[in-house]
Image (spheres, helix red, strand yellow):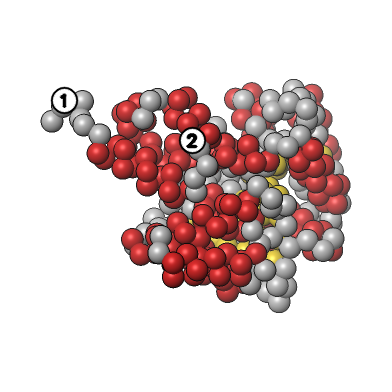
């Protein structure tokens, strides 16, 4: 990295940390640019941001659940609570992609109804570009940028299915929003997907008896101790429309975050998020054969978690290893 490039990256990182919206938007656009010059600038930027990330105080929260459960309305209600508490909030809203353009179908996620005049809220919509897992490949790199400038980074997925558990592998706290009376949530629980969230929420509590029944079903079927350990998974009721239960949900999210901080887990968890992101990208590009050539999934993930390199440097180094390695036939 040359000196002018390093200086430019340092200046941009400082602007992001100060909450400069133009700098944040520019950095996100840079991460989405695949041209070599832009990728070199993005690599330098992430190097600056990730050096400071162990000391960052931002919380990365994932919201998932079936379509129609009210995730966006609940997100908007949470944002209002966080803003009343003086917290700056960024949102990465992952939408279904257009089959024609490949872009996000819902654009700027206007249904969140956040104030366009509030400098403390930043919303970015992303296309999932047909990827399974409910997320987009850009979510983790963009989260690194947003964690540098905001107190809360909220990721909302396109929906949840039995394969769509990526959000739990990239977030500090994962919240599953259930739709009252749909039956989907209990089915997901039986399939094991509800072992993933740290918080279960039955939204639309204003629906009355049907919401209370879903709350009881989830509470009865759930194994309360999270696989992470030291956390009892709560089942909460909210009504985003009336605001009921939203402050309690925000409180529980904060409690989970404070638990991770008190146990000094955040830095290690985020290295794990990064190793998972890298594994997934490499598997998408090189397939299972490529992962085996790097030592296999378990060894690769352990190697990545132990490294102290920024995201794109790690990815470039691994691609170089795969592209320069002799083939299995020796040719």
- In the image, residue 79 above or below residue 276: below
Q: Residue at x 69, y 52 (%)?
A: 56
Residue 278 relative to residue 110: left or right? left
Left or right of 125? Residue 313 is left
Decide if residue 154 is on the left or right side of residue 22. Answer: right
User: Residue shown at 82%/63% (left/top)?
Assistant: 86
Q: Is residue 274 above or below residue 292?
A: below
Q: Residue at x 62, y 25 (%)?
A: 192
The vertical placement of 40 against 254, above or below, is below
Q: Residues within 10 Å of mark 1 (few under 14, many from 20)?
A: few
Relative depth, front residue between 302 and 24: 302
Expressed as whole percent of the image width and height from the top left, the position of residue 292 reads 35, 26
Q: Quadrant of residue 300?
A: top left
Which image quarter holds the C terminus? top left
| Mark 2: secondary structure | helix
Q: Is residue 199 visible?
A: no
Residues at marks 2 and 1, CA–CA distance in whole angstroms: 27 Å
Quadrant of the image for the N terminus?
bottom left
Q: Which mark is residue 134?
A: none
- Classify residue 19 by image quadrant: bottom right
Toward the front, the furthest residue is 3
Measured from the top left, where is residue 271 in percent x and y?
Answer: 57, 39
Q: Nearer the viewer, mark 2 or mark 1?
A: 2
Could you tell me if the residues under marks 2 and 1 are in contact, i.e. CB atoms within 8 Å?
no
Q: Which residue is mark 1?
A: 329
Residue that badge 2 annotates: 304
Q: Residues within 10 Å of mark 2 (few under 14, many from 20)?
A: many
| Mark 2 or 1, nearer chain start | 2
In the rendered image, residue 297, in percent from the top left (x then y), is placed at: 44, 27
Q: Is residue 297 at least partly visible in the picture? A: yes
């Amino acid at each position: 990295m040359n000196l002018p490039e390093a200086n430019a990256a340092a200046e941009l990182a400082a602007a992001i940390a100060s909450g400069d919206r133009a700098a944040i938007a520019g950095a996100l656009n840079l991460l989405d640019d695949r041209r070599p010059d832009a990728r070199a600038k993005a690599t330098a930027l992430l190097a600056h941001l990730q050096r400071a990330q162990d000391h960052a105080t931002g919380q990365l929260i994932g919201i998932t659940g079936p379509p129609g459960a009210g995730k966006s309305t609940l997100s908007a209600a949470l944002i209002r609570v966080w803003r009343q508490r003086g917290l700056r909030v960024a949102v990465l809203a992952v939408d279904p992609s257009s089959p024609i353009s490949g872009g996000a179908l819902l654009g700027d996620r206007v249904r969140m109804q956040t104030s366009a005049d509030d400098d403390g809220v930043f919303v970015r919509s992303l296309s999932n570009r047909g990827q399974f897992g409910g997320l987009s490949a850009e979510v983790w790199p963009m989260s690194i940028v947003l964690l540098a400038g905001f107190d809360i980074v909220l990721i909302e997925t396109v929906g949840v299915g039995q394969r769509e558990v990526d959000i739990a592998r990239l977030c500090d706290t994962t919240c599953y929003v259930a739709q009252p009376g749909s039956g989907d949530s209990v089915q997901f629980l039986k399939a094991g997907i509800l072992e993933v969230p740290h918080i279960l929420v039955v939204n639309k509590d204003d629906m009355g008896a049907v919401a209370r029944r879903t709350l009881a079903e989830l509470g009865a079927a759930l194994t309360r101790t999270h696989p992470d350990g030291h956390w009892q998974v709560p089942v909460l009721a909210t009504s985003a429309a009336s605001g009921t239960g939203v402050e309690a949900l925000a409180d529980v999210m904060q409690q989970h975050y404070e638990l991770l901080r008190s146990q000094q887990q955040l830095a290690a968890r985020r290295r794990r998020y990064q190793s998972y992101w890298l594994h997934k990208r490499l598997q998408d590009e090189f397939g299972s054969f490529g992962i085996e050539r790097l030592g296999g999934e378990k060894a690769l993930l352990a190697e990545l978690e132990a490294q102290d390199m920024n995201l794109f440097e790690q990815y470039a180094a691994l691609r170089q290893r795969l592209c320069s390695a002799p083939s299995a036939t020796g040719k």
